[in-house]
Amino acid sequence: MEQSQKVIDQVMAQIKKRDPHELEFHQAVLEVLESLKPVIEKHPEFVEAGLLSRIVEPERMVMFRVPWYDDQGRIQMNRGYRVHFNSAIGPYKGGLRFHPSVNLGIMKFLGFEQTFKNSLTGLPIGGGKGGSDFDPKGKSEGEVMRFCQSFMTELFRYVGADVDVPAGDIGVGAREVGYLYGQYKRITMLYHGVFTGKGLTYGGSLARKQATGYGLLYFLREMLKDNGKEITGKKVIISGSGNVATYAAEKAQEMGARVVAMSDSNGYIFDPEGIKLDTVKRIKEIERKRIKEYVKDHPSAQYYEGSKGIWTIKCDIALPCATQNEIDEESAKILVTNGVWALAEGANMPSTPGAIKTYQNNGLLFGPAKAANAGGVATSALEMSQNSMRLSWTFEEVDAKLKDIMVNIYSQVSQAARDYGCAGDLAAGANIAGFLKVANAMMAQGAV
Ligand code: NDP
Ligand code: 2IT
């Protein structure tokens, strides 16, 4: 057996033994390690320094009780998390997720991926992630605020502008960031850039809200251009209808694509005339209702129960922007049969390993999450810069920087794939390029 395979088997055996139930974390680690084989062969010094077994272990993890009062005056309890995954290249940086499915394994998979994604941005940010199994759905404003305040009353000890800078993710948007930041400030008396995705009146960056979705489309455009194709006139499906999905759809439409479907965790809407985003924004951002409401305003559209059905729609390009493992092998095969030829991941790890194999076996242009959705965290790092400088850039300035970053990520990732003998495999390229910077920093810093 090759040396690299032995090393991978050892690392995998170690993490499975330590934490046998963390399936998403195992999946994320295996996907990275497998693509690092040529790196492991070329750099025996990494193995000698025990770097692989260190890089899969978070530097620190905190878990805490979050008690809060509901509107009936009863005390509810959730669990809070923050994983400090890797600070080799900068302070921990990554979102907070509030969703009932949250557990430590999901936090670790997200923190692990974040480390390499953040490295690809070229900006000095390490990897972190956090959240809670709190479900914001159906909660009143007061309940969400009391939960956020209680969550921050513990989390404030572990974050700071040069320590760890959280942001949003599933279930955490501008509203939650506002309550969290407000509580942080009350406790610490510090007015500094400890959160990103802040409101524009208190230190937020223009274009941060749009950045993940817009960045996804900038990345997609580069990938298509490199293969002699373009977005204009193409039929696109986008899963989810949250922050990433909405602004991916907005930029896709601006680039001349026809977005025909979007979804939420209950089902999907299909509008052959093209999704009217104003309606989606009103339903999801303002009214906080379900996507099925859309058909009331647009008789051209149909609503179907079950979010998985979205992958059965015929189209050119698919952009999963909802959650992990939302496309399994079966859905990937249907996409291929229906003629999809490009797919870029707005969500984190939306494709199962079987789905990724299906894309690769069928020659799909595939933009992996770590590269394709890095525009959000990159713009968060731009928000941190603006906060440190005590100034704010215009929308156009931030957007121009975001575009440059995404173009640069594409070229870095495709170059790394060529350098390590897997030209065209952007998933491997992203893992390799993201890994090398972090690994070299860790080597330089000694036994960290
Ligand atoms: P939001 O909470 O704004 O939106 C999430 C969307 O995904 C909603 O439409 C939600 O539907 C749907 N969804 C969530 N869980 C599931 C599920 N289990 N099955 C089906 N649909 C689901 O989150 P974001 O848009 O911020 O995040 C979406 C994805 O993008 C996540 O994977 C996140 O990690 C990733 N990401 C986010 C970034 C950001 O800047 N926000 C940056 C990079 C990646 P419902 O309303 O029914 O729950
Ligand atoms: O997955 C992600 O990159 C995010 N949720 C954004 C993190 C951030 O710090 O902006």
Image (tube, rainbow, N blue to C red):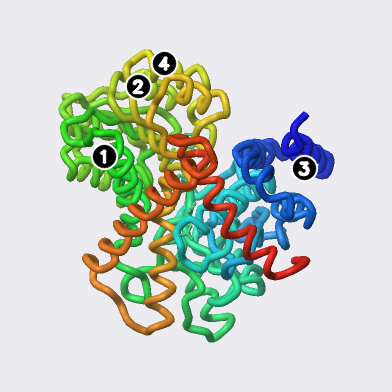
First-in-chain label (3 vs 2): 3
Q: Position of residue 166 (x, y in %)?
A: 53, 64
Task: Check disc 1 and report its element: helix, strand or loop.
Answer: helix
Q: Position of residue 420 (x, y in %)?
A: 54, 42
Residue type, numbered disc 1: Lys
Q: Which residue is mark 1?
A: 225
Q: Residue at x 30, y 39 (%)?
A: 226
- Depth-wise, is mark 4 or mark 3 nearer the camera? 3
Residue type, numbered disc 4: Ile
Which quadrant: the C terminus?
bottom right
Task: Check disc 4 and report its element: helix, strand or loop.
Answer: helix
Which quadrant: the N terminus?
top right
Q: Which residue is mark 2?
A: 304
- Crowdedness near tag 4: few (<14), some (14–19) or many (≥20) residues, C-alpha within 10 Å: some
First-in-chain label (1 vs 2): 1
Dividing the picture into quadrants, the one containing residue 149 is bottom right
Q: Does the CB distance between marks 3 and 2 fall below 8 Å?
A: no
- Depth-wise, is mark 3 or mark 2 nearer the camera? 3
First-in-chain label (1 vs 3): 3
Q: Which residue is mark 4?
A: 334
First-in-chain label (4 vs 2): 2
Nearer the observer, 195 or 154: 195
From the viewer's perspective, is residue 183 above or below residue 255?
below
Task: Check disc 2 and report its element: helix, strand or loop.
Answer: strand
Marks 1 and 3 sit apart, C-alpha to C-alpha, by 38 Å
